[in-house]
Image (cartoon, helix red, strand yellow):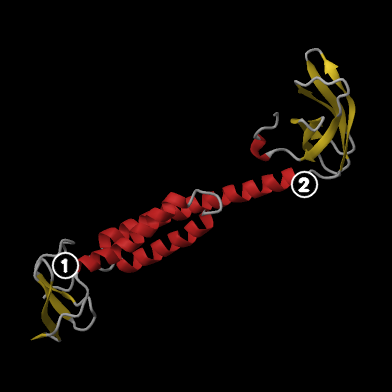
């Protein structure tokens, strides 16, 4: 009798009973048989174990989980779920590696799961960066922002003003100006020192006799600099 097969294709022979009901069970190269052995004594018992195909599938489980983790680990917010899936893939893969019928798929599951963990770590870092950037945009800090002039300049309507940083640390702003409540335009004002003021101007292609400009919103820098100038 041989305790472990050397060929994952499983040639005919005696192998540890996959159902754990007996010491060994005979495999004819295609499927398990009812021939079993206990302490070297052969007998015939009913076949109440999983088939060879099911054994292979048990090794495919960590592989599938690893692939899912790799596919979603880099995606912000989904990365947390992917991290859990990747860890399960590694654990299940390590457990199944000892079974020669599924060791190949199990090893692949460990590899893909490990890669999934790494990608999930990158996804978590991206998620934290996004949340920090959004928080900075939504919380610009104390400031005093005013419009100082609003009128036609050349072929455009220009709103000019100043923003004063009332915070104790340097701040950057995204200032949105509304023109007669018809249109809005934004401008970025970067690196305003504590207590300092910075000028800004916003142009819009509108012409009215009694044009009104007002501050629509003051935010921090847009996440990752997207659309700082509309």
Residue 131 x/y as whole percent = 65, 49
Q: Nearer the viewer, residue 229 or 63?
A: 229
In the drawing, does residue 99 fall left or right of residue 84?
A: left
For disc 2, the neighbor class at 10 Å (few under 14, some 14 to 19, many from 20) is some
Query: Label 1 belongs to which residue?
Result: 5
Q: Secondary structure at mark 2?
A: loop
Q: Residue furthest front?
A: 209
* Residue 211 screen position, x and y as percent: 86, 24
Q: Look at 44% across and 59% down and name the residue there.
A: 86
Asked whether 224 or 87 is in front, the reply is: 224
Side of 223 where 203 appears, left or right: right
- Residue extending furthest toward the top: 154
Can you tell which mark lies on residue 139?
A: 2
Foreground: 168 or 197? 197
Residue ID at (71%, 48%): 135
Circle 1 SS class? loop
Q: Quadrant of the N terminus?
A: bottom left
- Is residue 215 shown to the viewer in this render? yes
Q: Are marks 2 and 1 in contact (CB under 8 Å)?
A: no
Q: Does any portion of residue 198 appear in the rendered image?
A: no
On the image, which quarter does residue 24 sit in? bottom left
| Residue 83: percent from left, percent from top | 49, 58
Q: For the point 52% across and 54% down, which residue is it?
A: 78
Foreground pick, 3 / 201: 201
Of pointers 2 and 1, the one earlier in the residue sequence: 1
Q: Is 194 positioned to the left or the right of 23 in the image?
A: right
Q: Is residue 38 above or below residue 58?
A: below
Q: Which circle marks residue 174 in the picture?
A: none
Instruction: Determine which quarter of the picture holds residue 3.
Output: bottom left
Q: Position of residue 88 (x, y in %)?
A: 42, 64
Quadrant (top left, top right, bottom left, bottom right) of the C terminus: top right
């Amino acid at each position: 009798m041989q305790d472990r097969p050397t060929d994952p294709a499983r040639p005919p022979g005696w192998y540890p009973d996959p159902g754990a009901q007996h010491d060994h069970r005979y495999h004819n190269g295609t499927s398990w048989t009812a021939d079993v052995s206990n302490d070297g004594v052969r007998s015939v018992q009913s076949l109440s174990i999983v088939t060879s195909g099911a054994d292979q599938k048990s090794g495919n489980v960590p592989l599938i989980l690893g692939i899912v983790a790799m596919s979603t680990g880099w995606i912000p917010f989904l990365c947390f779920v992917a991290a859990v899936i990747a860890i399960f893939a590694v654990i299940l893969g390590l457990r199944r590696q000892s079974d020669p019928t599924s060791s190949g798929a199990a090893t692949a599951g460990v590899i893909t799961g490990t890669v999934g963990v790494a990608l999930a770590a990158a996804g978590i870092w991206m998620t934290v960066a996004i949340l920090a950037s959004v928080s900075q945009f939504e919380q610009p800090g104390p400031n005093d922002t005013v419009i100082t002039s609003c009128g036609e300049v050349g072929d455009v309507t220009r709103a000019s003003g100043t923003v004063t940083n009332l915070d104790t640390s340097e701040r950057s702003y995204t200032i949105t100006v509304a023109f007669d409540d018809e249109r809005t335009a934004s401008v970025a004002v970067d690196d305003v020192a504590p207590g300092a003021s910075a000028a800004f101007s916003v142009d819009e292609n509108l012409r009215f006799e009694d044009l009104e400009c007002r501050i629509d919103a003051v935010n921090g820098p847009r996440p990752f600099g997207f659309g700082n100038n509309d």
